[in-house]
Image: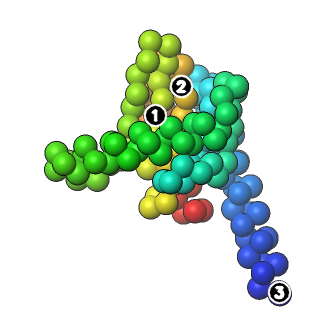
Amino acid sequence: MHVEVNDNTNIANRLLEIERILIAVQRRIPEIEGLVLVTRDGLPIASLLNTGTDEDQISAMTAASLSLSEHVVIELKRGTMEQVIITGSDGLIIIRNAGEHAVLVAIVQIKAKLGLVLLDMKRSADRLSELI
């Protein structure tokens, strides 16, 4: 029983750190309207959304997009999939690997500086991968 309590405490601490990372990203780049950390099979781990979009919906769509993107990369022999950028007329959706089991999804305003967003997402995804 003692081990179970430690495991639950460890999980809670990791979730708090994940939330801190998401909040820090959004503070550094206010053009990011939402962030979701999603398992590769489409389950939300943590989210910070200002868009009114449902995290379950984002997670499911991310899993579908991720699957297709990974197949394209494999079939075209481009190595392993690192990120997907979907550009719409009103903004971007960026899906970035966050380790073996998860991806970080950002909903970004069109006016954002893409280079800064991508750099911050890479650094944050690397930190998140250590927590998952």
Residue where numbered disc 2 is placed: 108
Asked whether residue 81 is in view, the answer is yes
Which residue is found at the position 57% from the left and 42% from the top?
A: 59
Q: Give residue 81's position: percent from left, percent from top.
A: 32, 48
**Residue type at numbered disc 3:** His
The crowding category of the residue bearing disc 3, from other C-alpha atoms within 10 Å (few below 14, some 14 to 19, many at least 20), is: few
Q: Is residue 22 above or below residue 30?
A: below
Residue where numbered disc 1 is placed: 94
Q: Which one is in front, 126 or 91? A: 91
Residue where numbered disc 3 is placed: 2
**Mark 3 or 1, nearer chain start:** 3
Q: Give residue 121's position: percent from left, percent from top.
A: 49, 41
Q: CA distance from mark 3 to mark 1?
A: 41 Å
The crowding category of the residue bearing disc 2, from other C-alpha atoms within 10 Å (few below 14, some 14 to 19, many at least 20), is: many
**Residue type at numbered disc 1:** Ile
Q: CA distance from mark 2 to mark 1?
A: 8 Å
- Under tag 2, what secondary structure? strand
